[in-house]
Amino acid sequence: MARRMPFTDQEILETVRMIELETLDIRTTTLGISLLDCADPDPARACEKVYAKIVHHARDLVAVAQSISADYGVPIVNKRIATTPMSLVAAASGSRDLVPFARAMDAAAEEVGVDFIGGFSAYVHKGFTHSDRALFDSIPAALAQTRHVCASVSLASTRAGINMDAVNLFAETILRTADATRASGALGCAKLVCFCNAVEDNPFVAGAHLGIGEPETVLNVGVSGPGVVRAALARLGPDADLLAVAETVKRTAFKITRMGELVGREAARRLGTTFGIVDISLAPTPAEGDSVAAILELVGVDMTGAPGTTAALALLTDAVKKGGAMASSSVGGLSGAFIPVSEDAGMIRAVEQGALSLAKLGEMTAVCSVGLDMVAVPGDTPAATIVGIIADQMAIGMVNWKTTAVRLIPVPGKGPGEKVEWGGLLGTAIVQDPGRFSAKLLSARGGRIPAPLQSYKN
């Protein structure tokens, strides 16, 4: 086994400062569990297997996270589980109603005490199996009837192109989920996301799931430190040039990643499982000082959404990835900078001030870690408009060979400029105006947008 570099006294003291003063934390320890061997022709028996296997492997996850947090003094905010896409597990049963599978996942998550469980998922970027269709049909009820379950679907990839039939169906699924959870401000849609180039070791919800190339069990860690990066740039001052800004972000990401890998490897050891990856992503919260928007403004824009924002975000995302790659050979997941609008106090302000629009957010997704995240739109937004929004994001990911995602929330009864309060990590959303034009003909055509020329690399 290769020897690991020891941590210096200076690194330890810096880490203590980052935790105490700059809101550094381990955002999530996510235990991936393969459920492929839970498949059964009897759906009730399959659900029993799903529940039993999750509880068996995850029963100590929360206790281990708490013990590491106490031993190392590092906050571990969320404890999560990611499973094999449920459309694969449920396929052998031939069931058309997969809500019982979601309830089994939810009951297991409740039993072991985790915050969320991801994996009510399907890969449909080239087409549907019968089980994939059943999963899509079951999403609204599954998310309405469960507390911890998150759902995700892969609609596109650079290799396959964009499955527009799936995009159409997903847009309808979003609207049905919003209606099914209207009493909570369409909260079900906050647990529902679609992807282009989905990542199979993503520890962050709502897209967390365990890809088919992953081990039987694996511990992945997501580290977040926007407050640390913001503080480092504030100390740097306004006179430094952009190369110095990038270098500061890179060095800070290096330190954050080292801490994340230490925690991840120790958690995996205590759980008796494999350590997978550390995802170094600047994932904001509604707390003041824990904002990606604040970082962009320190880089040099008046307010997030102003001209120059996309350039500043590109610098930030690249520097975070470079710092992570310097620190560890196990960087994975998404890694970069997230822009979940309702979860970032600075972005909420930018929307209120009119600086940050839906169109500008779409532009920013070309250079951030993921895509349109936690964006509220009016509850009466037509399905064809949602299809167009999703298709645009899938196209950005497909052409640029990057992961893009859409977590869109049509809030029943709300119009542009109105607020919806979800509280906690999900924060406050200002309903965005998607405009009065849609993509009716594009939606009606269906079929598949073919893979781009750059996909042919064999």
Image (spheres, grey):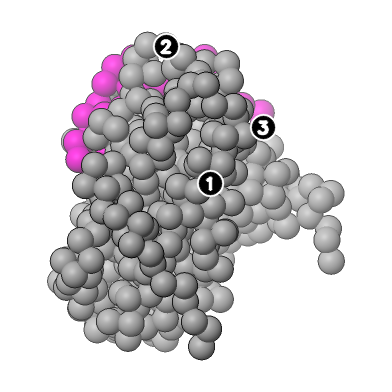
Q: Position of residue 56 (x, y in %)?
A: 24, 84
Q: Residue drawn at (54%, 26%), measured in percent from left and top? A: 240
Residue type pointed to by label 3: Leu
Q: Of all residues shown, which one is farthest toward the front?
A: 9
Find the distance from the CA under tag 3 to the CA under tag 2.
30 Å
Closer to the eye: label 3 or 1: 1
Q: Which residue is mark 3?
A: 442
Q: Position of residue 447 (x, y in %)?
A: 69, 46
Q: SS at mark 3?
A: helix
Closer to the eye: label 2 or 1: 1
Quadrant in which the C terminus appears: bottom right
Q: Which residue is mark 1?
A: 250
Please report whichever mark, 2 or 1, sits nearer to the chain's N-terminal start.
1
Please report whichever mark, 3 or 2, sits nearer to the chain's N-terminal start.
2
Q: On the image, which quarter does residue 134 sit in?
A: bottom left
Q: Count all numbered tags in the image, as a single digit.
A: 3
Check whether the beta carbons of the residues at disc 2 and disc 1 lie within 8 A of each other. Answer: no
Q: Is residue 310 above or below residue 94?
A: above
Report the disc number at residue 354: 2
Residue type pointed to by label 2: Gly
Residue type pointed to by label 1: Lys
Span shown in magenta: 417-442
Q: On the image, which quarter does residue 417 sit in?
A: top left
Q: Residue drawn at (44%, 17%), measured in percent from left and top? A: 303
Q: SS at mark 1?
A: helix
- The reply to whether residue 162 is visible in this rendering is no
Q: Is residue 222 above or below residue 366?
A: below
Q: Is residue 51 left or right of residue 190?
A: left
In depth, the one of 251 and 392 nearer the eye is: 251
Q: Of all residues shown, which one is farthest toward the top?
A: 353
Q: Residue drawn at (37%, 49%), measured in percent from left and top? A: 224
Q: Position of residue 30 (x, y in %)?
A: 34, 66
